[in-house]
Amino acid sequence: MSRSTLFTGVRLLDPASNLDQQGDLLVQDGVIADFAASLGRPDGATVVGEAGAILCPGLVDMRAALGEPGYEYRETIASAAEAAAAGGITTLAALPDTLPAIDDPALVRLLRARGEETGSLSIVPYGAVTAGCRGEELAELGLLSEAGAAAFTDGGKAVGSSRLMRLALSYARGFGGRIVQHPEDPSLAAGGSATEGELATRLGLPGIPVAAEPILVARDIRLAALTGGAVHFAHISTAEALSLIRAAKSEGLAVTCDTAPPYFDLNETAIGDFRTYAKLSPPLRKDADRRAVAAALGDGTIDAIASDHQPRDADDKRQPFAQATPGGTGLATLLGVTLAQVHNGTLGLMRAIELLTIRPARLLGIEAGRLMKGAAADLCLFHPERIWQVKAGELPGKAQNTPFDGRALEGTVLGTWKAGRRVFGGDASVP
Amino acid sequence: MLDLAESYVLLNRSGKTQRDLLRGRTLINLFFEDSTRTRTSFELAGKRLGADVINMSVSTSSVNKGETLLDTAATLNAMHCDLLVVRHDQSGAPNLLAQKVDAAVINAGDGTHEHPTQALLDALTIRRRKGRLEGLVVAICGDVAHSRVARSNIHLLTTMGSRVRVVGPPTLMPAEAERLGVEVFHDMERGLAGADIVMMLRLQRERMQRGLVPSAREYFRFFGLDAAKLAHAKADALVMHPGPMNRGVEIDSEVADDPQRSVIKEQVEMGVAVRMAVLDTLSRRHGRNEP
């Protein structure tokens, strides 16, 4: 059966090829058949078009936790796929600090297969850096890589030992593996639940000093220089760490980083009156750090924007603040919160989409995140100005712990296509 | 609130009670952390106003603390309690409870966050002795970082126009303490110089175990209040302590038991009066006279 879809009169946006033009795009048999200023309508093709809509590659989310395996009460792969589709995400890199941890090649293959079963979301698994993400000895990085692990990380746990990090960077270099670090000095962060400073002092919450981030970033940059290995820092949230990364890049080291929407959209005041949905790891920072992160999106220091999706259930969050589990959902809000930086003039639209598509795809070493003839038709159609409001309890998927509860977002996903098949939205289609 | 408490001091001293005020009202003392002093004080305050007082001690050593907290809230709500006094070892726990129960919730100390009735009783004690709060120099000394008493006193006293200093080793000082409107000192002699009030805080043994202070004897040498250090404060300076005291750690017995300087026992008396005023006020807000 031949399935074809013609997108007509949309703004085609592809950062990988620097394409930004009004036009048509034709999908046939799951791949992008053609795109041009104007295309004819093949017989039987579904036509999709909406004034003001933008068609870009399906988003590539390079950092998200799934509830499976082990935490299905928080989220299943099926529910994450539903939320991802609603967020325009067609490829997602899954963190390995699950139960069990993804430290075995069979588990990498399982996750990839589970992604295929969803029909809407490619799952690119991370492999654990250390066995069980316990931070004691290296996992079988080579075997994990062979099974399809895109890179290595212990997820929300930092590789704390300098010696172990050196070994990981050094060993992974042998097969081009990148080590993704949660940049937070574990001994400084232990027991903390908010950024150390006036607000944490007023709330009587144990603080984590801002320095916990640049300390580990500085160490790992030196270890990358020592080993020649590639290090990637996840969810960067401080100005100081960004300065170090900027300097390392100009030094020519294999150092990259991403951030997540909470770190350029929210500051620590979001935890106000003990709001546990805004308890994240790393914790939200003062506004000066937030502004530094937003500025670094545009200047090349930050290589990607990831959702940093961390599903939690009500019992994880309905706790006294210090006992609540950190983490926020991020799949459905990834695009909208990023576009807020476009609307406020901080970031160009092309750059914003680049950070959500081709840049993370290249970091993960996968073929995704671009509009290319013959490539799988993973697509996201969105309206950059249409407004919606984030409401915890009404988000797609199971996990509802959004730190953006109540936030009005300008930028709405109209539809998502995976390999040419529509997996989200329906309003935009014209028979 | 202080004026109302003042009237309850007189009532208590006269030996009379006002048992019709909270008649038929249920007050539950919900303590997730041991505190004989505060619990007894609230119990007495409730009983003197005629409330039915129930004490509940809940162990926080159970596996899932948060679940216990919310389960307990649901249970209490079903019992139609009117006034809920909460002590918890986690900052913000009373805020969480207040979202889940219909009763008026009174924070009797939460984690390292606040202890509002302690600050009120301290202010009442000071005002009765000094006749005012405005312009007084108050030195709060010791483990400020982990002290809810310090935080609540800082908020109350700076609001009332006192000049508040905090004195202690840097490892026991909260980050950006000066942002709370206080002067920060790391030296007792300088911190106490010219002070009208010297308020000592309890140092828990756990701080030594975590290495924030090397030893009790070192702490006492530099931050324990003895007659020599107190001599730097004003000649008529008062010594306060929220209790229970660690004699020989943060305070010397000679000072603690000096009837000319120490108002520690008076603080306990004021505690009952202040809590009566708080219960009175909150029960009015919560429609005490409705059926």
Image: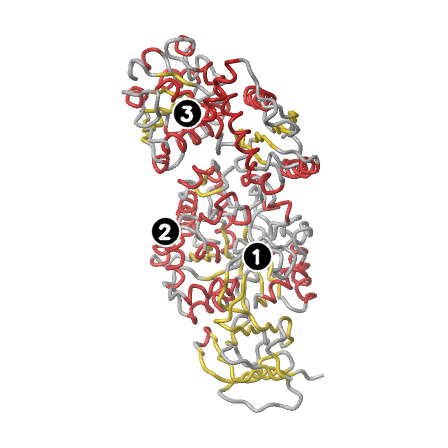
- In-image side of B203 versus A92 (left or right): left
Tell which tag, 3 or 2, sits nearer the viewer.
3
Give neighbour class at mark 1: few <14, some 14-19, many 20+ (Cα, 10 Å): many
Marked residue chain, label 2 = A
Tell me the residue that label 1 is attached to: A64
The answer to whether residue A355 is seen in the rendering is: yes
* Mark closer to the observer (2, 1): 2
* Quadrant of the snapshot with the C terminus of chain A: bottom right
Tell me whether the residue at label 2 lies in contact with that at label 1, contact meaning CB atoms closer than 8 angstroms: no
Q: What element carries label 2?
A: helix
Which residue appears at 47% of the width and 22% of the height? B7
**Position in image of residue A219 (x %, y %):** 41, 46
**Circle 1 chain:** A
Question: Residue B206, percent across and down?
Answer: 50, 24
Q: What element carries label 1?
A: strand
Vertical order, A298 against A25 (above or below) = above
| Image position, residue A184 (x, y; %) | 47, 45
User: Which numbered dot is residue A288?
Assistant: 2
Residue drawn at (52%, 25%) of the image: B275
* CA distance for labels 3 and 2: 37 Å
Q: Same chain for the residues at labels 3 and 2, yes or no?
A: no
| Mark 1: amino acid | Ala
Residue highlighted by disc 3: B123
Give the secondary structure at mark 3: helix
Co-location on one chain, circles 3 and 1: no
Question: Three-letter amino acid code at disc 2?
Answer: Ala
